[in-house]
Amino acid sequence: MREHGYEVEVSWTGATTGYREYSRAHEVAGTGKPVIPGSADPAFRGDRDRYNPEELLVASLSQCHMLWFLHLATDAGIVVTSYRDRAVGTMAESADGGGRFTSVTLRPEVTVHSGHEKLAELHDRAHHLCFVANSVNFPVTVQSVA
């Protein structure tokens, strides 16, 4: 089995003088890549203009599915001209303040020149192959819109 490594740097500066006072703003960076502005979810005193970890997890699942789908479509000779996914994740808080994701639903909308009849099969295969979907402990469903 081949292994792949991934490195990012998450950095924050400030002062944790009190729960309400400290900034949740931080940056996510990778060598030679644009910085992603991060924060907590606004429900947890975060900045709504920055990405929160929960959004990035949903985005990661969506990206992984899309990239596999495009690969499989190309292999099948299907020309994809557009792909958009309006993915939705649900997280439930626990009594102790923690929580977990309970589900993510991917809703890809794909435009192709031909091969419409194969889209459901390609989505199923992409879902099966997605590294990220295979790594989470909650259901990820795909509701494709042809």
Image (spheres, grey):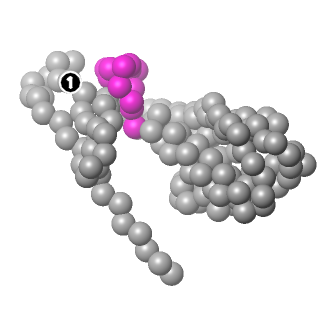
Horizontal relation, residue 116 to residue 110: left or right: right
Q: Which residue has dot 1 on it?
A: 23
Q: Is residue 93 above or below residue 48?
A: below
Horizontal relation, residue 5 to residue 122: left or right: left
- The picture places residue 36, in percent across and down from the top left corner, at 33, 36
Q: Quadrant of residue 45?
A: top left
Horizontal relation, residue 110 to residue 121: left or right: left
Q: Quadrant of the C terminus?
A: top right
Which residue sits at x=29%, y=38%? 35
Horizontal relation, residue 21 to residue 88: left or right: left
**23 and 67: which is toward the camera:** 67
Which residue sits at x=47%, y=78%? 2
**76 and 145: which is toward the camera:** 76
Look at the magenta stretch and give its main secondary structure.
loop
Which residue sits at x=53%, y=33%? 92
Q: Quadrant of residue 42?
A: top left
- The picture places residue 85, in percent across and down from the top left corner, at 64, 35
Q: Is residue 115 above or below residue 17?
A: below
Which residue sits at x=82%, y=55%? 121
Q: Is residue 65 above or below residue 129?
A: above
